[in-house]
Amino acid sequence: MAPAECGGQPIAEIGLAFSAQGKRADGKLLVDYLRWDGAPSLTLRRPSSDCDFWRIAWVNGVDFYSKRYAPSFRISQNRGEGLISHGTRQWTDYEVKSEIAIDLGTTAAFGARVQGLRRYYAVRATRVGKLQIVRTRDEDTIVLAEADYDLVFHRRSP
């Protein structure tokens, strides 16, 4: 069964319901573990309801993660690189789509296969007009592909 779209909100609780055919049900039920395999079908965005719970579902590795600006995800990092991430290493076969904008920083990016603050693949736009696919692993960032990019500040670009 495909999961329902949750309007940008994370899943916070899972309930189990049981029924019996007879007039009464005796016994005990022990749930040893519960797991969810594969990538969920969801859109990660700001929910329409006024709630901050959706922000808590993200791993926050940035200096500033706004909840007041129009874009769902407006983040800033004062020094070095920062990121927010969502999901697990077990997610496979998923697609990432985003618009990015550079306002003041040197780069703006979105990542996939994020396995920590210093292990990920990303597509990034640079202030000097390059669009890059990079792999970061610990202290090494390798540019896997690069193309010229017509950068316009303060404008979202797919």
Image (spheres, helix red, strand yellow):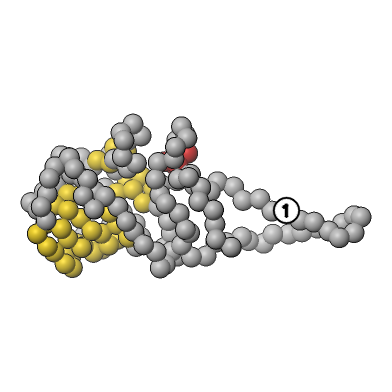
Measured as percent of width and height from the top left, residue 92 is found at 42, 67
Q: Is residue 78 above or below residue 18?
A: above
Please give left or right for residue 25 compared with residue 79 in the image: right
| Residue type (three-letter) at the residue carrying disc 1 | Ala
Displayed quadrant of residue 71: top left
Please give left or right for residue 114 compared with residue 7 in the image: left
Q: Is residue 82 above or below residue 50?
A: below
Which residue: 25% across, 59% down?
122
**Which quadrant would the N terminus be assigned to in this image?**
bottom right
Displayed quadrant of residue 121: bottom left
Measured as percent of width and height from the top left, residue 14 is found at 62, 51
Measured as percent of width and height from the top left, residue 32 is found at 67, 62
* Mark 1 surroundings: few (<14), some (14-19) or many (≥20) residues within 10 A: few
Please give left or right for residue 24 compared with residue 58 in the image: right
Measured as percent of width and height from the top left, residue 30 is found at 73, 59
Q: Is residue 118 above or below residue 145?
A: above
Which residue: 48% across, 65% down?
38
Displayed quadrant of residue 91: bottom left
Which residue: 14% across, 42% down?
153
- 117 or 9, nearer to the observer: 9
Number of marks drawn: 1
The answer to whether one can see residue 140 in this image is: no
Which residue: 17% across, 53% down?
125
- Residue matched to label 1: 17
Element carrying mark 1? loop
Farthest right residue in view: 23
The answer to whether one can see residue 107 in this image is: yes
